[in-house]
Amino acid sequence: MIAIQHEDVDIGNLISAAKSAGTGAVVVFDGVVRDDNIREMELEAYEEVALRELEKIAGDATRLHNLLHVDIIHRIGRLSVSENILIIVVSAGHRPDAYAGSRYIIEEIKKGVPIWKKELTKDGGRWVPGEHAHGAGKNS
């Protein structure tokens, strides 16, 4: 499953779906809203382009790291501290491939998928540059 959505997902179901014949390892990445003195986080995406990029990244990761299964779910909208933002579930025949595939996916997403985050504080909010603030810049 490759998706950009408001709703959370059942990570347990994703893990179960990732297990198939030949699976020797499943790696889960669950990026959550960190408590950096914020109230909430607002995430926006250029959905059509972001989905296309996520699908390309999933395909590249599958080929480069011998993955058997890939899920990438990126949430958008307003999220509270400790809520899931980005879930990546990959499976492979061997542990090194699963770890490398998961790492490849997160690093590629950070390079340029058009998804932006705004941290909402008691004093207002700010668009966050850098890690996990993807794509062309947003201004506050």
Image (tube, rainbow, N blue to C red):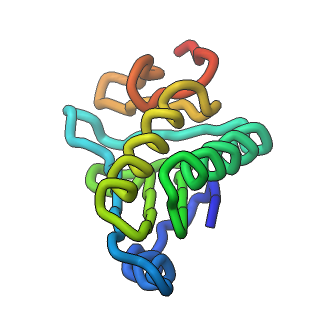
Looking at the picture, how far across and down is residue 72, in whole percent? 54, 57
Q: Nearer the viewer, residue 63 or 34?
A: 63
Residue at image point 54% right, 58% down: 73
Can you give x and y, in whole percent of width and height, for residue 133 in the image?
Answer: 48, 27
Image height check: is 81 above or below 136? below
Q: On the rendered structure, is 52 left or right of 60?
A: right
Quarter of the image that includes the N terminus:
bottom right
Looking at this view, name the residue that lies furthest to the right. 48
Q: What percent of the width, then of the height, locates residue 47?
A: 73, 44
Q: In this view, does 50 lie above or below 99?
A: above
Q: Quadrant of residue 82?
A: bottom left
In terms of image quadrants, where is residue 35?
top left
Q: How many marks?
A: 0
Along the horizontal axis of the image, is 84 left or right of 139? Answer: left
> At 43% across and 84% down in the image, what residue appears?
16
Q: Which of 126 and 47 is in front in this view?
A: 47
Left or right? Give the position of 122 relative to 105: left
Which of the two residues, 20 or 10, is positioned nearer the viewer here?
20
Residue 36 in picture, x, y percent from top left: 21, 33
Using the image, determine if residue 139 lies above or below residue 82: above
Viewer-nearest residue: 106 or 60: 60
In screen coordinates, is 130 left or right of 109? Answer: left
At 79% across and 43% down in the image, what residue appears?
A: 48
- Residue depicted at 59% across the width and 15% down the height: 137
